[in-house]
Image (tube, rainbow, N blue to C red):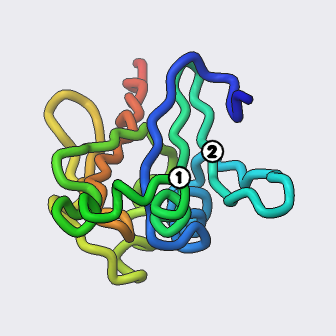
Amino acid sequence: MKIHRARHSLQLAVSQLSVTEAFYAGILELPVQRSFTSQGAPDYLVMDMDDLALIFVEEDDVIRSHPMLEPRFSMFPRGIGMTLHFRVTDIEDISEAIVDEGLEVLYPLEVKPYGIKEMWCFDPDGYLVVLDEPVEKRKKAGP
C-alpha cells in the first residue's frame, strides 16, 4: 500500500512525531500531513513534494517493526550525513521562530550574492536543514 503520491520517498526516523510536525508544519509551514492509519499501525507524517515524499516515522516504531536495526540507531545518530533543502516564504519570520525555539543554527540568515536569502539549522532530531527564499527584485523607478 502506497502512502503518498510521489514516485520516490525517503523515510526518516524521528524521536517524536508531534515535535517533528511542530517544526516542519508549524515553524517552516511546509505541507506535512499526519497519517490516517488502521488501529495498531504506527502513525507517521508525510510531506508529499511532486516526485519525492519525506516520510517521518518514530524511531520506536521502526525498531518494533525491524528489531535488527536497533543497534544501528545507537551507532549512527539521526541526521548524520543528510541535508534537507527547502524553499520557504517569510524566511525572516521562520529564522526568528527557530531562534526563539532554541533550535541550533549552523549559519544564520544571510543574503547571498546569487539572489537568495539562506539559513542553515538543525531540526529537533539533528537533521541539517537548509532554508532559502529568493530575494525579490525591486523595479527601478522610471523618469
Which of 15/70 is in front? Answer: 70
At 25% from the left and 73% from the top, the residue drawn is 104
Q: Is residue 93 visible?
A: no
The three-letter code of the residue at mark 1 reads: Phe
Residue 107: name its quadrant.
bottom left
Residue 121 in the figure: left or right of residue 62: left
Quarter of the image containing the N terminus?
A: top right
Quarter of the image containing the C terminus?
A: top left
Q: Which residue is mark 1?
A: 56
| Residue 64 screen position, x and y as percent | 53, 63
Residue 132: name its quadrant.
top left
Which of 134/49 is in front? Answer: 49
At 41% from the left and 34% from the top, the residue drawn is 136
| Residue 27 screen position, x and y as percent | 53, 64
At 30% from the left and 56% from the top, the residue drawn is 127
Q: Is residue 84 visible?
A: yes
Q: CA distance from mark 1 to mark 2?
A: 6 Å
Residue 114 in the figure: left or right of residue 123: left
Which of 8/99 is in front? Answer: 8
Residue 9 in the figure: left or right of residue 32: left
Q: Which mark is residue 83?
A: none
Vertical comparison of 34 with 9: above or below: below
The three-letter code of the residue at mark 2 reads: Val
Vertical comparison of 120 with 26: above or below: above
Q: Which residue is mark 2?
A: 46
